[in-house]
Amino acid sequence: MRGVGAALGWAAIALLAGCERPRTELVVRVESELEWGPGRTVQSVVLTVRRGGHDGAVRSVRTTALGAPPERQALPLYVGVIPLDGDTDAPLWIEALGCGGPNGCAAAQAVVAQRAIVRFSPGETLELPLLLATACVGAACAVDQRCVEGGRCEVATRAQEAVRPFAGVPTPTGTDAGSTDAGPGVDGTVPADVEPPPDRPPIADAGALDHAAIP
């Protein structure tokens, strides 16, 4: 009877595991071809997420000072975005600004910018790469465009073609939703914890960090 009970226990565990719903999440990965860190070309990254488009409701704004942990964060930067009410029905506008100072910047003062307009895929954890490319320094792309090879501008919706399955292991807690009045220099988010693949650097910007006071 003990063997039967053990078998039933394992069967129940297997049944529960099979009932777990896949997680819907978008992991934003920010990288840079430019030198980054204190005194370098790119000293901080401002990552903004809006619902719908560039003029949509702000979900989150975070400024991350770049450099050696724990005071600063290293690239690549991973930020998990999970859906709120209605997010699966509308696109997300995501902008990464590479700033020349540690306290963030506005788009007009950014050294380089990259944008994307993408959608969640229900039941899938996907990765969105955003590259702050050398060729994109000074590129005058519109707010609904992204910068691609050669510094050319194209519609930001084309970024959906670059979205790929995330190879890491996301955990089921956290959200990137922040206050709608957050701005550059303010980390208005509580991001999802995301574990990068084993062959990649540790997750950066995994907590709510305010780098506005970093000299």
Image (cartoon, grey):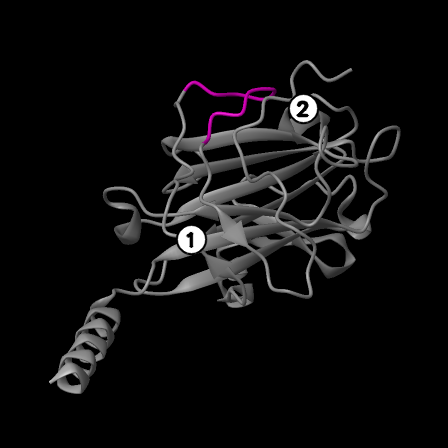
Task: Tell me what residue is drawn at x 51 percent, y 30 percent.
Answer: 61
Please, is residue 6 above or below residue 92 in the view?
A: below
Evaluate if marks 1 and 2 touch, with contact meaning CB atoms under 8 Å apart: no
- Circle 2: element type: loop
The answer to whether residue 119 is seen in the rendering is no
Residue that mark 2 sits on? 105
Q: Write the start and end of the magenta stretch as one range.
A: 181-189
In what quadrant of the picture does the C terminus appear?
Answer: top right
Between 51 and 85, the residue placed more toward the observer is: 85
Residue marked by disc 1: 171
* Mark nearer the viewer, 1 or 2: 1
In the rendered image, the residue lying farthest to the right is: 39
Left-right relation of 18 to 55: left
Count neighbours of disc 1 (C-alpha within 10 A) and say few if under 14, some if 14 to 19, many if 20 or more: few
First along the sequence among labels 1 and 2? 2
Residue at horizontal 47 percent and vertical 51 percent from the top: 117
| Residue at the left extreme of this rendering | 1
Q: Position of residue 145 (x, y in %)?
A: 57, 48
For residue 129, side relative to residue 98 (left or right)? left
State the mark number for residue 186. Answer: none
The kind of secondary structure the magenta stretch mainly shows is: loop
Question: Residue 43's x, y, as percent?
Answer: 78, 31
Q: CA distance from mark 1 to mark 2?
A: 31 Å
Q: Amino acid at mark 1?
A: Thr
Answer left or right for 131 relative to 178. right
Give the amino acid at mark 2: Cys
Residue 5 shows up from this direction? yes
Please give the name of the residue rendered at 88% of the width and 28% of the height, measured from the top-left corner.
Answer: 39
In the rendered image, the quadrant that contains the N terminus is bottom left
For numbered disc 1, what is the local secondary structure? loop
**Magenta run includes residue 188:** yes
